[in-house]
Amino acid sequence: MSERKKLPKGWRWRKLGNEVVAEIIMGQSPPSSTYNSNGDGLPFYQGKTDFGVESPSARVWCNAPKKIAQPEDILLSVRAPVGPTNIADEECCIGRGLAAIRGMKQALTEYILFYMKHIEPWLSGQGEGSTFKAIGKDKIEAIEIPLPPLAVQERIVEVLQQADAIRCKRAEARRLADQILPALFLDMFGDPAINPKEWPVKEIGNCTTLVTSGYTPRGGAQNYIDEGPLLIRSQNVRMLSLDLSGCAHLPEDIFNAMARVRILPNDVLLNITGASIGRTAFANEDIPPSVVNQHVCIIRLQKDILA
């Protein structure tokens, strides 16, 4: 991890394996003869493949478990991949692809969970092994965590849970919008492939003044700063809406050098690569100074033909 940061008064750096911080239970796979698919015994989770959004889903049960996680324990994937987490929602058997983390006297399990999510990118690089990456108990126990007093942990957890709930609601709203809005378009205008309402048809090039994609500045993410003009990427282009949260910010000199791909009010933005290809959004009059990368196309309409 990066160099220790100075902590607020009353906070302390502690190793995760400290007996007052957390108990680490490494999974162990029981004999295959004890597995079943009819619900006999405890749910048996073997690794990340069993994870859900928050808690895992049982596919296999075990009637002779070796290692058991308790409800509310953190389940940490320790083998290919290293780092993802879930929460056990019931007593369960864990295999060698998982470890359970249980908060002790000085640490709330929920607080540890949010910290583990925060360091997941770093943790994913800590695995060892030539065939597949894995992390052992000693490395997990050696992870250092900044611990405030329990009352402060409770407040931090409360705030982060509220923020996470908002994030989940926004994600669900996006998912529904991506499904509903295209259906509404078809209902209003018909299927463009067969044009049942016999709308006039023109090529995009005959209705626009600009059709172009952008680019990522040389150096990529090394150029990004905390504030400044926006770099719109494919994840920011939702179906019929722009999501400017999580946008990359560029220095003014780089932004000015990308003037050719600056977004203007009333531009149409189209994702042209990857899994989100085809998602389209509209730049409103209040669009902040922004440019696009190579995965997004700007379509600038001729106002006397299209509005």
Image (spheres, helix red, strand yellow):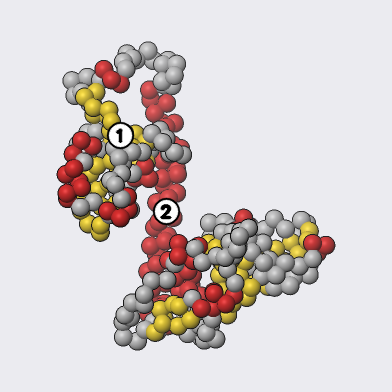
Q: Amino acid at mark 2?
A: Lys
Q: Secondary structure at mark 2?
A: helix
Q: Quadrant of residue 186?
A: top left
Q: Nearer the viewer, residue 118 or 243?
A: 118
- Residue at left offset 39%, top offset 67%: 160
Q: Which residue is mark 1?
A: 213
Residue 287, given in percent of the width and then of the height, sits at: 21, 43
Q: Is residue 36 above or below residue 20?
A: above
Residue 202, given in percent of the width and then of the height, sits at: 31, 15
Residue 245, given in percent of the width and then of the height, sits at: 31, 52
Q: CA distance from mark 2 to mark 1?
A: 31 Å
- Residue at left offset 28%, top offset 20%: 205
Q: Is residue 150 above or below residue 89?
A: below
Residue 231, given in percent of the width and then of the height, sits at: 27, 46
Q: Secondary structure at mark 1?
A: strand
Q: Amino acid at mark 1?
A: Ser
Disc number lying in front (2 or 1)? 1
